[in-house]
Image (cartoon, grey):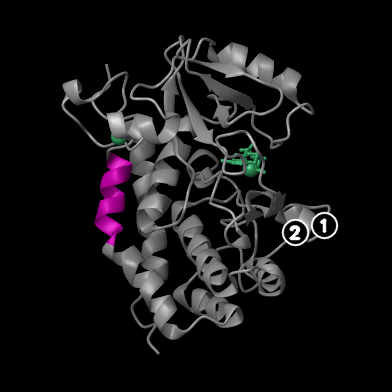
Amino acid sequence: MFSKCLSCQLSAAGKDLTKGYHRTCSKQLFGTAQPPDVPFKTTEVTAEAQKMVGRMSISGVQPKLSVIHDRRRHELTVVDRGGLFILKPQTDRFESLPENENLCMNIVSTYGIEVPPHGLLPLPDGKLAYLVRRFDRLDDGSKLQQEDFQQLLQTDDKYSGSYERIANFLKRHSDVIGLDLVRLFERALLFYVLGNGDAHLKNFSLLRREDVGYQLSPAYDVLSYRLVLPEEKDDMCLSLQGKRNSISKKDLQGLSEHFGLTGKQVNNALDRLSALRSSIEMMIEGSFLEKRLRNRFLEIFEERMDGVSNKGIRS
Ligand SMILES: Nc1ncnc2c1ncn2[C@@H]1O[C@H](COP(=O)(O)OP(=O)(O)OP(=O)(O)O)[C@@H](O)[C@H]1O
Ligand SMILES: [Mg+2]
Ligand SMILES: [Zn+2]
């Protein structure tokens, strides 16, 4: 029995939740009033994911399955092709990644960054897995064109890149340049304060939407890697003004100038984050992470917020 929603993570009197979901949260993610069951255990997901490597159109390092929601049987089914969701289970290497990813996706969404519908689902072994809807698939199964920035920038190394290089590409190819540059700036800011140190070139994509054309895709794979990898050398894997660590408001200002953003746009982005500071703290405290990880996450967040706070950036 869950006392808070497995998707939005807000508390609710038990009776308001069905199988751990608010009705509206379930509708948004699954299109049904109740979430489906997951008929396979964490170990089975990991074994199945091994088999699917190379067969799926989605890659990435962590084990994952491509699934659809079988509404007749009220359960998730694994598919080779045409999956509408990606399921990411717990891993042996890093603890609580599903809880971590659901929390971080909720935080960036609260800030105003577009993310696909997502949530946690309990497996029969009692462990939670993370589930996200694919933004490159429409309900009828048709596919939108999507290309990640390692492919777009034609580099062999997903870690050799910078926010400036992504911005330069957007300036040439986005159909909504001004909007995408603000979006990229907001992501650099949020990814830094959350400790999302694994935001490499494959974790940014350009998506071709039928209505607007080419633009930055919704955000995905947003996690606090600093939380599970405290010994990692760099805070950011893509550089920003030549730096990967100790990002300051001055660095953000330099980045915004490279992007061609106005002082007003930058102040707006920073002011909105400062205004949300206590709400984000509450989201961390109210997450499904265990207390030790919640406290550590708060420390990471506070330290970085102090570094980038808006005091002094005025134009
Ligand atoms: N919601 C989504 N909709 C469409 N495509 C997605 C979505 N989420 C992820 N992808 C695609 O699948 C790939 C792998 O997903 P993701 O980045 O979440 O996995 P990962 O194994 O954690 O990655 P990494 O290798 O960065 O650790 C992404 O690079 C992206 O191309
Ligand atoms: Mg990834
Ligand atoms: Zn909810």
Secondary structure beneath label 1: loop
Q: Nearer the viewer, residue 29 or 181?
A: 29
Magenta run includes residue 122: no
The answer to whether residue 6 is left or right of residue 85 is left
Residue 289 in view here: no
Instruction: Tell me residue 238's x, y (percent).
Output: 65, 60
Instruction: Tell me residue 245's x, y (percent).
Output: 56, 63
* Range shown magenta: 276-285
Which disc is residue 201 wearing?
A: none
Residues at marks 1 and 2 touching, judged by CB atoms closer than 8 Å = yes
In the rendered image, which quarter contains the C terminus?
Answer: bottom left
- Amino acid carrying label 2: it is Ser
* C-alpha distance separating marks 1 and 2: 8 Å
Instruction: Tell me residue 212's x, y (percent).
Output: 58, 62
- Amino acid carrying label 1: it is Thr
Q: What residue sits right under mark 2 in the picture?
A: 160
Which disc is residue 155 wearing?
A: 1
Q: Quadrant of ligand 1?
A: top right
Q: Quadrant of residue 292?
A: top left
